[in-house]
Amino acid sequence: MIQKACWREHLTGRHKPLILHSDNGSPMKAATFLEKLYDLGITPSYSRPRVSNDNAFAESAFKTLKYRPGFPVDGFATLVEAQEWVQLFIQWYNHEHRHSALRYVTPSQRHSGEAETILAQRRNVFEAAKQRHPERWPGDI
């Protein structure tokens, strides 16, 4: 999966260091997995043991997943059902979910570079609104 992601995103041979941050689970520390990371030029990074909020980005993603409408609180009946649900979640998260930390654009818009245009257009709309009704804008937009 990591190798396919590197190929898909054209990450091999980059000058910028790549780091994969994960928990301390045995799959993430397995010798074959670590060797694959090193082959791909990726440096492994780990959360501190028994520190649940050390990996804030992953924890935030899991919270979004668990609180997504339709999440089966009683679990999945089969592995295939779980895989299908997660694939739909990933599609929604990347292409529909407007993330507050990304200034309410989707991750795919940020990744593709579309976010710059969208945010510039928003700024223009807000600037025009401020010009029409400056009393509604006590500070910056």
Image (spheres, grey):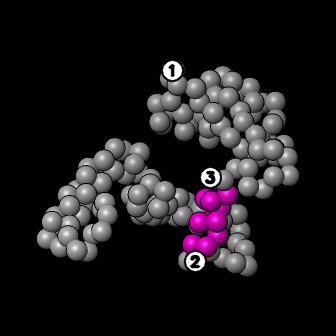
Position of residue 89 measured from the top left corner of the image (x, y, whole percent): 54, 64
Q: Amino acid at mark 1?
A: His
Q: Amino acid at mark 3?
A: Phe
Q: Please state, as top left, top right, bottom left or bottom right, where the N terminus lies in the image.
A: top right
Q: Residue at x 64, y 28 (%)?
A: 42
Q: Residue 64: say if magenta.
A: yes
Q: Who comes first in sequence, dot 1 or dot 2? A: 1
Is the residue under label 3 in contact with that under label 2 (CB below 8 Å)? Answer: no
Q: Which residues are magenta?
A: 57-68
Is the residue under label 1 in contact with that under label 3 (CB below 8 Å)? Answer: no
**Disc ID at residue 56:** none
Count all numbered tags in the image, as a single digit: 3
Q: Please state, as top left, top right, bottom left or bottom right, where the C terminus lies in the image.
A: bottom left
Secondary element at image label 2: loop
Q: Residue at x 72, y 74 (%)?
A: 75
Image quadrant of residue 44?
top right
Q: Residue at x 30, y 68 (%)?
A: 138
Label 3 packing within 10 angstroms: few (<14), some (14-19), many (20+): few
Position of residue 74 measured from the top left corner of the image (x, y, whole percent): 73, 79
Nearer to us of marks 2 and 3 is: 3
The residue pinned by badge 3 equals 57
Q: Nearer the viewer, residue 135 or 57?
A: 135
The residue pinned by badge 1 equals 15
Q: Who comes first in sequence, dot 2 or dot 3? A: 3
**Disc ID at residue 70:** 2
